């Protein structure tokens, strides 16, 4: 019998980890089988757990309160280069994809992926394949391309924005009203206005239409 691929889950939401564990265990009997050996809800827990259990594949959330996927990659990759990381996130933003791939992740899939597809993705990254949800592959190709017009991998203007400002900008560029953005992010309309004003100041743009085009050019939409 083929030895199982050992998997470690990293996500700050316990219910989500439980769901992923249940789905993977339900489909674990493929070839090779999958074995979930541990899980963590923070960067520190992840680093310690991965060091102790030495899994083949780590399913890694991108955003966590204490640093997220990039922080885990930065602390683990040097010491354990054989561990393979597959990002599993609700975010489909270009900067998130590029950051974890540059950090050493072998793939990036969104949380809309089916259980069967996730199991297949784990098996594929284990043998060296790069795996991406369909629309995300273009972000990576652009980031690592030197062709004219390719989006820059590092954008000093984008780096000026906070995580929350990017969230607001992304929704604004998708056509959300201030009230809808407030509801989506669980903040007040006044806070949304403050973030938009800050983004306008930092980007030196004058209205939401210019911001939408600026966000689209950087694949934030």
Image: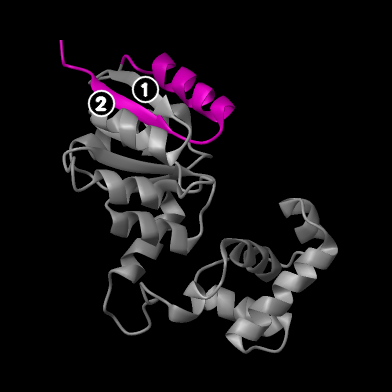
Indicate which label's residue lies in the foreground, 2 or 1. 2
Could you tell me residue 81's position as x and y percent?
Answer: 17, 43
Residue in the image at 33% along x and 28% along y: 49
Above or below — where is 191 with respect to 218? above
Residue in the image at 23% along x and 46% along y: 77
Above or below — where is 108 with respect to 162? above
- Magenta region includes residue 20: yes
- Residue 170 seen in the current view: yes
Secondary structure of the residue carrying tag 2 is: helix
Above or below — where is 167 with respect to 43? below
Q: Is residue 15 left or right of residue 131?
A: right
Please state the total of marks drawn on the protein image.
2
Residue in the image at 34% along x and 28% along y: 8
Q: Is residue 191 left or right of residue 138?
A: right
Find the magenta span and give its range.
1-29
Could you tell me residue 10's position as x and y percent?
Answer: 42, 34
Residue in the image at 34% along x and 69% along y: 143
Give the Cα distance between marks 2 and 1: 10 Å
- Magenta region includes residue 21: yes
- Disc 2 and disc 1 in contact, CB within 8 angstroms: yes
Q: Give the crowd class for mark 1: few <14, some 14-19, many >=20 residues within 10 Å.
A: some
Could you tell me residue 217's position as x and y percent?
Answer: 51, 78
Secondary structure of the residue carrying tag 1 is: strand
- Give the farthest residue toward the top: 1
Location of mark 2 (residue): 52
Q: Quadrant of the N terminus?
A: top left
Q: Quadrant of residue 59?
A: top left
The disc placed on residue 38 is 1
- Residue 131 seen in the current view: no
Q: Earlier in the sequence, mark 2 or mark 1?
A: 1
Could you tell me residue 102's position as x and y percent?
Answer: 30, 59
Q: Is residue 84 or residue 113 the one in the foreground?
A: 84
């Amino acid at each position: 019998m083929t030895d199982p691929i050992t998997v470690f889950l990293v996500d700050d939401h316990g219910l989500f980890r439980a769901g992923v564990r249940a789905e993977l265990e339900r489909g674990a009997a493929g070839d090779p089988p999958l074995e979930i050996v541990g899980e963590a809800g923070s960067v520190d827990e992840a680093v310690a757990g991965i060091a102790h259990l030495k899994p083949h594949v780590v399913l890694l959330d991108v955003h966590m309160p204490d640093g997220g996927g990039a922080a885990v990659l930065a602390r683990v990759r040097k010491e354990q280069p054989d561990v393979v990381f597959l990002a599993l996130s609700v975010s489909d933003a270009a900067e998130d994809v590029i950051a974890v791939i540059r950090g050493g992740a072998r793939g990036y899939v969104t949380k809309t992926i089916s259980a069967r597809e996730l199991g297949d993705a784990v098996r594929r990254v284990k043998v060296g394949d790069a795996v991406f949800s369909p629309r995300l592959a273009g972000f990576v190709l652009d980031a690592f391309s030197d062709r004219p017009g390719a989006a820059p991998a590092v954008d000093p203007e984008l780096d000026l924005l906070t995580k929350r400002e990017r969230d607001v900008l992304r929704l604004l560029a998708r056509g959300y009203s201030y009230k809808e953005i407030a509801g989506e992010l669980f903040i007040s309309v006044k806070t949304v206005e403050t973030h938009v004003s800050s983004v306008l100041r930092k980007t030196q743009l004058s209205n939401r239409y210019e911001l939408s085009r600026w966000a689209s050019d950087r694949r934030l939409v």
